[in-house]
Image (tube, rainbow, N blue to C red):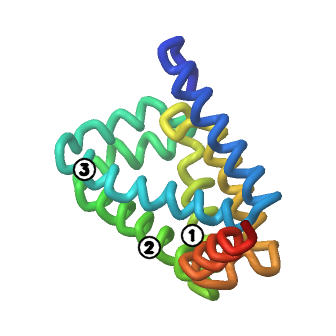
Amino acid sequence: MFYLPEDALPHAISLTASVLMLLAAWRRPVLGRALDVALFAWAAPTNLHAVSTDPAQYLDFANLAVLDAYADIIRGPFAQHVTLYVTLIATCQALIAAGLFTGGMLARVAAVGAITFLVAIAPFGVGSAFPCTLIMATGAALLLRHPTALQDNLAHRTRAAWTTRRHAH
């Protein structure tokens, strides 16, 4: 769980990004939603690439887990089928990104999926950049509470905002 000195800068960047994502979800929910889409759209192929090149690296998370149950799962069933599990995780990350992008009920379901995922990986401690995932989960929860943040297709919302700004100048 302890951060090494060489991890200070990456952790500071992750912490700053998570706080900015939370602030965006609170003050500019469409931007917050777009940032969540970007996070999960980035994470899915990143995990697929990582597991295809070095699946054993995921076993290191057992040493970072703050809960013995998490370490036991990594060393047990997960270790036997790393590629399968990480591919399932990456698929879910891609579905979360797609759902948040799509809007409507799919976005609400995807937001719940994002919250669940982000909270579930928090016990990996430094391996999940704790407490960043809990901060990001709070931002996703704010999106659920906002009356219009998840309503429309994100492409339509972005295009409408861009068109309005272009014509205003």
* Percent position of residue 28, x then y: 76, 61
- Sequence order check: which comes first, mark 1 or mark 2? 2
- Sequence order check: which comes first, mark 2 or mark 3? 3
Query: In 3D space, how far apart are the residues under numbered discs 1 and 3 (Cα atoms)?
Result: 22 Å
Image-based side of 1 in relation to 62, left or right: right
Query: Which residue in the protein does label 1 denote?
Result: 113
Rendered position, 72 above or below 38: above
* Percent position of residue 111, x then y: 62, 70
**Residue at coordinates 63% horizontally, 62% vertically from top-left?**
115
Query: Which residue in the protein does label 2 denote?
Result: 95
Residue projecting furthest to the front:
169
Q: In this view of the protein, which residue sits in the foreground, 41 or 90?
A: 41
* Percent position of residue 29, x then y: 74, 65
Q: Quadrant of residue 116?
A: bottom right
1 and 3 marks in contact (CB < 8 Å): no
Image-based side of 30 in relation to 14, left or right: right
- Sequence order check: which comes first, mark 1 or mark 3? 3
Q: Residues within 10 Å of mark 2 (few under 14, many from 20)?
A: many
**Residue at coordinates 50% horizontally, 20% vertically from top-left?**
7
**Residue at coordinates 58% horizontally, 64% vertically from top-left?**
114
Image-based side of 99 in relation to 58, left or right: right
Query: Which residue in the protein does label 3 denote?
Result: 49
**Residue at coordinates 54% horizontally, 49% vertically from top-left?**
121
Rendered position, 151 above or below 64: below
Residue 1 appears in view: yes
1 and 2 marks in contact (CB < 8 Å): yes
Q: In this view of the protein, which residue sits in the foreground, 15 or 83?
A: 15
